[in-house]
Amino acid sequence: MAFLFRNKPKSNAELVKSTKELLIRLVEEPKANPKAQTEEELAKNLQQMKTSLQGTPEVEVSPESVHQLLSLIVQEDLLYLLANNIYKLPFESRKDTQVIFSTAFRYKPAGASDPQVLHHVIQYRPEIIISLCRGYDRRESAMPCGGVLREALKYDAIAALLLYDEPTPDGKTRDLASVNPDIASSGEGVFWRFFDWIDKGAFEVSADAFNTFRDILTKHKSLVATYLQTNFDVFFQKYNAVLVQSESYVTKRQSIKLLGEILLDRANYNVMTAYVDSGEHLKIVMKLLRDDKRMINYEGFHVFKVFVANPNKSVAVQRILINNREKLLRFLPSFLEDRTEDDQFIDEKSFLIRQIEQLPPAPVPPPGAPQ
Amino acid sequence: MAVKKEADAYQVLEELGSGSFGSVYKAINRDTGEVVAVKHIDLEATNDELSDIQAEINLLGTCSSPYVAQYITSFVDGVKLWIVMEYLGGGSCLDLLKPGEFSEAHIAIVMRELLFGLDYLHATGKIHRDIKAANTLLSDKGKVKLADFGVAAQLVNFKSVRNTFVGTPFWMAPEVIQEAGYDFKADIWSLGITALELANGEPPHAGAHPMKILFEIPKNPAPRLEGPKWSREFKDFVAKCLIKDPDRRMTAKELLHHTFIKRAGKVEAMCELIERKQMWDLERENASHPKYYEETMVDLSPRTEDEEWNFDTIKTSTVAPARHVTKRRKMARIPSASSDLEGATSKMESMDLNAAPLGTPIDSPRRVSRARGAHRVPSTGTAIRVPSGLTPTARRVSNQPKQPLAVDISFGNSPSTVRFCKRVSSGERRAALSSNPSANSFHPNPQARTFRPSPPSSVHPLDANNENVPPTSNQQSIPVTKEALLGRRAYDKSLDSVFQESLADSAMPHQREAMAKVAQAWSHLDEVDPHGEFMLLKAMVDRLQSDSRLASALGVSVSPVPTPRRESTKPSETMLSGSTAHGTGTTRIRSSTTSTGTGTTSIRNPPGLSASPASTPVQTPFSTPTGTTSTSPLKGPKLVLANNNPHLKSHRRRQSAFVTGEKGVWGNEKLADIDERKLPGHVEKGMEQQGLLQDILYGQWMAGLKSRWPLV
C-alpha cells in the first residue's frame, strides 16, 4: 500500500474529473476490455482523494485543499455516482469511498456550525442518502454504506428523509419541506425496506442494517415518537411479524431488546401505552417467555414487565393475565432462576409476581377507558 | 434457508483450541476444498451485546492483507455464530516458543512481517491493541500473520485517540495504562515487548503479579534487551520500540527501515521453527486424542404440555403449539380430531403450519426436526445423542481445561487469550454495572464473570429451568451459602477497588508493596473461601462499631435513621443477612430500629405495608428463593434505604421505579422512572461506578493471566 506519489499527483480538478469519467466508464461498459485497468486507475484516484481529505498519520491535510476538493466533488455530483456504484469498486476502494463520504459529511468549514456538504445533500440531493440505503441490497456495499449512513444519522434531517421517504412518480426523492407528518406512510418507502434487509440479509448485512435501523429509531426521539404514533399499526404489525418472530436468532433477540428500548423511552409514552393495551401484543410477548432460548426469554421479560406493571391495564390484557394467573405464578418463580446475580431482574420478577397475585378476579375496565 | 446452507458448506474437523468465547475448529469447505479455521461463538452463552461481536466482525471484514489473518465469512447457524478465517497451520508464535526461544534471525523475520501487518492496519485507521506472540500466527509455509481482533479499535480519523483500557498487561504501553489517550504507537510498544518475549521466552516482569505490572510499566524505565548473544542492531530495534513517550516512538513505516529489519531473511526460514515444534511434540508424545467437533445437543425433547399459555379469546388453531405431547386444559374448543393426543400430533402440526396467525409457534416440533436436520454434518459421527433424562445437554463445555491436542493438529489458530480482558465498550460497561450476567449461580472466579461470556454449565439452565419443576425447588438452586455469595459480592463491588485505590494512593515503594501483599492475600481469600471472607468482614465491622470512637471516625457509627413508617418489629436473622447484599458488603444491620452508617439500611415493618406493592422490590435478592415469592410475599421484614447513603445509590436507582410505583398511579412519574431504568443494560449518566469497572478489569486480567503464569 505504498502511497501513490510515484506518478505525479493529480490536481484536485483533474482528480475529480477523471474519477467521474472512470466511474461512468465502469458503469456503462461493464464488460469493456480493459476493466482491470479502469478499476486500477479508479482505485488510485479514490485513494488519493481519501488521502487528501483525511491525511495520513504522517501528513496533515491542508484546509484549503480539502475545501476545494469537496467543492469540486459536490459540483460534479460525484457522491451520487459513488453511492450508486460502490459495490462495483474494488475492495480497498470501497473503504476509501466510505472515508471520502464520512469526511465529506462531517466537513464543517472553519467557523461554520453546519456540516456544509451534508446540508447540500439534504437540500438538493437527498437521492444520495436513499442510494446509500440501497447499499444493503448487496453484501459488498452493505458495510461501507452503513458506516456512512450512521455517520449522517447524527442529524435529524437524515432520519426524517428515511422515515418519510415515499415512492414518487418521477422517481425523485421527496423534499422534506413537503412532508406532512400526520399522513400515514404507505409502507413503500425506503425505511420499510430495512425490515427485509434485517430479516433476509446475510449475517453481516443484516447486522449492519439492524444497527442503522436502531440508530434511526433511538436517536431522534421526538421525530420518531410522532412517526410511530401516526404509523402505529403498520409499524408494529410489521415489527412483530418480521422481527420479533424472526427465524433468525440474532434478529429476534436484538429486535426484542430494541422493542423494549423503544417502549421505555420517555418520548414514546403514548406509543407505549398503546402498545401495552393490545392483547395480541401481550400474547406474542408471553410466547417469548417460553421460547427455548434463554436470552430470548430474558429480553422478552423486559417487554412483558411493561404490560404487567401498567396500572391501567386494558380489559384484553387483564383477561389474558387473569386467565393465566395460576400458570404465571407457577412459571415465574423458576423463570431464569439461575440469574442469581442480577438483582434488578430478581426484584422485577418478584414485583411482577405480586402484581399478578393482586389482579382482580375478573377484568375491571380501567378508569377513563372507553367501555 | 440460506443460513443452513452456509453451515453445511463446511465439514468441521478437529478442535484447534477453545477459550471462554467458544471453540476454534479446523474445517474444510466442501465445495472448494479450502481448509479454514472456524470460530464458534455460542450466542446464547454470551451476555455481550451482540453488536460488540458484530463490531469485531466488521473490523475483520475490512482487512485484506497478506500480513493479517484473512477473514472469509461469518454467519449464524441456530444460536452459533460461525466466523470463518484462513487456516494457519503453523501455530502461534507462543506455541513455537514452547520448545525454546527464537534465534535473532527468526525474530527479525517475525518483526518485519508484523511491521508490515501493523503498517497496513495503521494506514487504514485501526489499532490492534493486543500484539503479542500468542496473537501472531504462522501459516505452514512460515508466513507470519496478525490475528485476533477481539480488542482492536477503528479510529474515526487519524487525530482521534482512544482511552479505553484494553490489552494484556505485560504488553501494554505506558500511555494505555495511564489512560492518557493513545493511538497507533501503542501497538509499537507491544511489538517491542513481543520481541523480548520471543527472545527470552516470556515478556518482561512475567513472574510478577499483573496488577503490580500495571503500576510498574509507567513508573519504571522501559525494558531493554540484554545479553551478549544479541546484536547491537537488535538491541537498538527493541529500544526504539520501547520508548515511553509515544510521540518519540517511531511508526511502523519508519521501523521498517531499521537495519535490524532490513537484513531479516526470508519467511521460509520460519519453517525451521515449525518443524522444531513438531519434533518437540513428537518427542514428548503429547499426542492425545484429538477432540472432534460435536454438534451441540440442546435438549430438544418437548416439555410436557401442561404449561402453555391460555389465550382463550383466540381461535384454538392459533394457539395449537403442536408439541409432541399435547395436553391442554381449558381448551374446550379444540377440534375433537386432534384431542387424541399422541396420534394426532402430526395432524396438529400440519394444521398449525398455516393456521397460526401469530407466526411460527415457538416450540413446534417442526422447528425441532429442522434443527436436527441442519446439524447433520458428517462430523457428528462422534456426537452422542444424550437422552435428556440423564444428562440434560451435551453442550460443549468450553471452560474445561484445555486438553492437549494431538501432534499433527496442535498447530493452528489458537483461540484468543485476550477475550478475558477484551474491549470495554459501553455495552459491556453496562453489562458490568447493572445486569450481572453470570449464567451459573456460582463461578469459582467471580471477578471474571462480567467480562466473559458465561461458560455453559454442564447442567444447562434451560433444563434446570424446566417448567415442570415445581417452584418449591427454588431453595436447592443456590449451591453455596448466602454468606459466600455476599463475601464474594463484597469483594467484587468494594474491597477490590478499595485495595487498588489505596495502592494507587501510596507513594513509597515499601508501602506499595505491603499494600499489594494485602490485596493479593485478600484476593486469594476471596477465591478460596468467600464464606470466611464474609464472616471476617462481619466480625471486623462489628468490632469497629462497638468502639464508639472508631465507629464515628470511620463513619460506621450507629445512628437512628429516619424512616417514614418505621415500626419496631424484630426482623428474622436470615432476612437480615440476606438483606445486606444490597449494600457494599460492609453493611451490617444491628437492630430493627437502627442501621449502620456506611451501608445504611433500615428495617421496615411489614404489617403496615401489606397493601403496598412497592414494598416488594425492596426485598433482598435472596428473598425470592427463600420463599417470599410464595403466596404471601409480605411476611418477611422489608428494608428501606436511607436517603443519605451514597454507597447505595446504585441500589436505589434500581429500585426507584418501584418505589414510586407505590403511588399506584400510572402517571408520568412512574413512566419517568421506567424510562430512567430502561433495560437491564442501562447505566446512569453519572457513572459512579467507573472505578468498579476498572476493578473488575483488573480482576479480569489476573484471572486470565493466572492461567498462563501461575502466580507467585
Image (cartoon, rainbow, N blue to C red):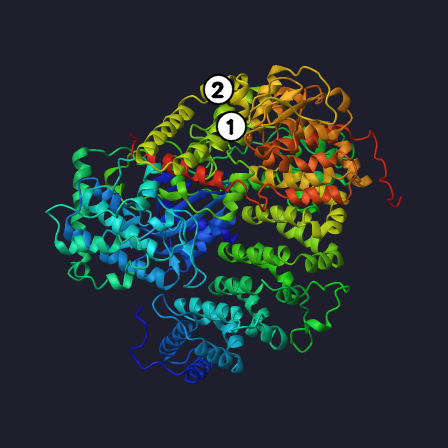
Identity of the residue drawn at 72% across and 64% down: A186
Give me the chain letter of mark 2. Answer: B
Residue for badge 1: B441
Foreground pick, A308 / B128 = B128
Q: Position of residue B534 (x, y in %)?
A: 48, 21
Identity of the residue drawn at 53% across and 82% down: A75
Q: Which mark is residue B432?
A: none
- Which quarter of the picture shows residue A229? bottom right
Q: Residues within 10 Å of mark 1 (few under 14, many from 20)?
A: some
- Which quarter of the picture shows residue B245? bottom left
Residue sitting at the far right: A371
Give me the chain letter of mark 1. Answer: B
Q: How crowded is mark 2: few (under 14 residues within 10 Å), some or many (20 or more)?
A: few
Evaluate whether residue B246 shows in this view: yes
Q: Where is residue B205 in the image (x, y as percent from the top left)?
A: 26, 39
The amino acid type of the residue labelled 2 equals Met
Residue for badge 2: B540
The amino acid type of the residue labelled 1 equals Ser
Q: In this view, does B42 lie above or below A18?
A: above
Q: Position of residue A40 (x, y in %)?
A: 36, 75
Identity of the residue drawn at 73% across and 73% down: A178
Q: Is residue A38 above or below residue B426?
A: below
Q: Position of residue A293 (x, y in %)?
A: 56, 38
Q: Is mark 1 on a helix, strand or loop?
A: loop
> Are the residues at dot 1 and dot 2 in contact (C-beta closer than 8 Å)?
no
- Which quarter of the picture shows residue B313? top right
Distance from disc 1 to disc 2, alpha carbons, whole Å, reads: 27 Å
Q: In this view, does B100 lie above or below B264?
A: above
